[in-house]
Image (cartoon, rainbow, N blue to C red):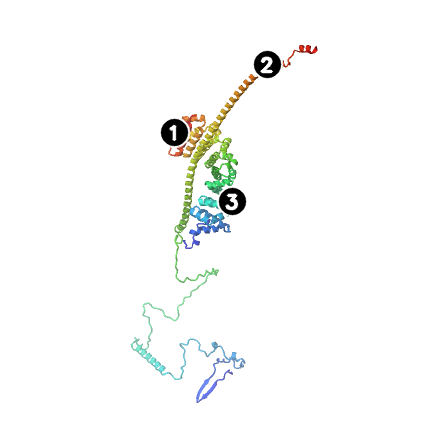
Amino acid sequence: MARPQTSQQPQTHLTQAPVAFGNWALPKLCSELQDDELVSRQRALTALCDLIHDPERAYEAILNGCMERLKFLLKDDDGLCRVKTTEALYILASHSLGRDAIFRNDIMGPLADLLDDPVDACRRNVHQALNRMAEYPSGAVFMVSMGLVPRLVLKVPIEAEIIRALILSTLSSCIMINAQPALESDAIPVLRGQLSHQFSDIRRSATSALVGISVPSNGKVKVCEEDLLPLMVKLLSDNDQGVVANAAGTVMNTAVITRGKHEALKAGAIDPLLRLVASDNRAVCANALRALTVLAEVPSARAQLLGHVSLLKTRLQHPDSTIQRAASSAIEVISWKP
Amino acid sequence: MASTLQPQHDTQGGVYTFSSRPRPVPNRAKYRNTAEPLNEEEGSHGNIMYDRRVVRGNTYAQHILPVTSQPDPMEFLRQQEARRRAMSKKRLKEQFGPKTPEPLEGRTNIDVQTEMYLEELSDRIEEVSVECQTDMFLDKPATPLFIPDKTGRDAATQIEEGELFDFDVEVQPVLQVLVGKTIEQALLEVMEEEELDNLRARYQAFMEIRNAELVEVQRLEERERRLHVERENRIKQQKAVLEKEKETADKIAARAFAQQYLTDLLPSVYSNLKESGYFYDSVKRGKLTGM
């Protein structure tokens, strides 16, 4: 029975606060966020989480000063409040204005404090928020300077699968900015433990973190020390293309130093890499070509690869310029005579 | 009976007037010997309901005594009229009505029934005695519930299924709101995710290129470093060889010089010593000193 009064119409939003129309929606929600009653806070948070997906609403919310309220609510006693607050922050982190606001209001500190929260969903949202923040260079720089990397490395073995994948991708983003904190906090053994996990997401993030770690020279040395190259060669035949590309990337990075070259050759990297050159995936192909380039500086490898120059020459006609360049430099190095 | 108010008799110019204040009709004493009650209020008037002088009942057919003793001339005339009319009617009836002839002498008329069926006429009324006996006393049955008779007109109405509440019609606005809101929210989220996916894809592409270029740079760096180190090594090696050679040459020269220096040394030493007299024959010396 349709009634003209809105208060008597059937309620479709019992778990959410009723959202006012137009411009009044967000100011009202923001004021409801600091209500004394727990139920109205939860309902307001749920409604806010739904609205914030729209960039314009997110902008309005930030203008109405909801960031301080969210920062205050991060320390709330109720678990659901914290879950929803972290979810709102994670959605805000996908908008650039949200990221700015998070930096300006120093929300990263309290957010990182919630890494040890007892509620699972809250931790998952925290990690998702950190992951989104780390995907952007300024965020990753800030997180590294905040000293978050050692804490994240400690968290990797103990958390559940979904959260582990998130932590690993956050770590790989941070490592790409600066790998030293991760190296100092013994990330390599931790990462090595994740390489054989059944979830391809975890393997992919772990291998991409390893790619980042093997960029600086002491990282390369450490990778050789920890005997990771045989594992990498094994992962070259993985099902997931992301994992394969990252494994090839790690090999190519590590093989720049002489010791790495020898270890890679000892692990028999050349044959899988040759197979990967013909792959369609651009990342896989480029990384394989460059790995072969690096390995070809060793005379024995060069001799072995001279027979496969024709295969590399086919890659010269690839439409992508990176692959063309990689193929040409590979051929050049292989055919170099002292 | 003393009344509260004395009637007033007034005679003025031969006209008699009488007036008294209104008072209740005094009651007749029931018994002759009863002394009058002192309380005049109660006894002086009685209940008019029990007063024999009050006219009771219908007053329509009462013989009202005429006000005057003389008969009303109009009334008298009317009565005469009525008498005359009755007489005339009676005479008419006698003249024209059928009459039975007078009986002969010694005979009397007797009434005879002339209908088809004879009827016995008698004074004695036929009676039939009928007996009736009630049944043995039964228990009084329960009194039926008193249901007063229905008054007024009955009207009936019946509500068919679907007339008051039709689910399909009512649910539409609710469904619209629910579905609309859900779809709106879903659209928002899907658009956001798509945007993020696009961003991520571009980021991935960039990272691939960056990594590849980075490793190329590192490889070239490493090669340069190796070559440099190699070069340094060679140069050092060469220098060492040269150094060694020089040392060897110096050693040889020194040795040759020393040899040459030393060949002359021994005979000159001996000759000097001989000249200084350090080499002597001990027998000769002994002989010289002993002498």
Q: Mark 2: few, some, or many residues within 10 Å (few <14, many ≥20)?
A: few
Which amino acid type is shown beneath numbered disc 2? Pro
Relative to B111, say whether A334 is above or below: above
Mark 3, mark 1: which one is toward the viewer? Answer: 1
Check whether the beta carbons of the residues at disc 1 and disc 2 lie within 8 A of each other. Answer: no
The disc placed on residue A284 is none
Mark 3 and mark 1 lie on one chain; the one further toward the N terminus is 3
**What element does badge 1 sit on?**
helix
- Quarter of the image with the C terminus of chain B in it: top right
**What element does badge 2 sit on?**
helix
Q: Identify residue for label 1.
A: A313
Where residue B169 appears, as percent x and y from the top left, is 39, 51
**Residue toward you, A159 or B166:** A159
Q: Identify residue for label 3.
A: A110
Q: Chain of mark 1?
A: A
Which amino acid type is shown beneath numbered disc 3? Pro
Q: CA distance from mark 3 to mark 1?
A: 55 Å
View extreme (right): residue: B291
Which amino acid type is shown beneath numbered disc 1? Lys
Same chain shared by disc 2 and disc 3: no
Q: Quadrant of residue B127?
A: bottom left
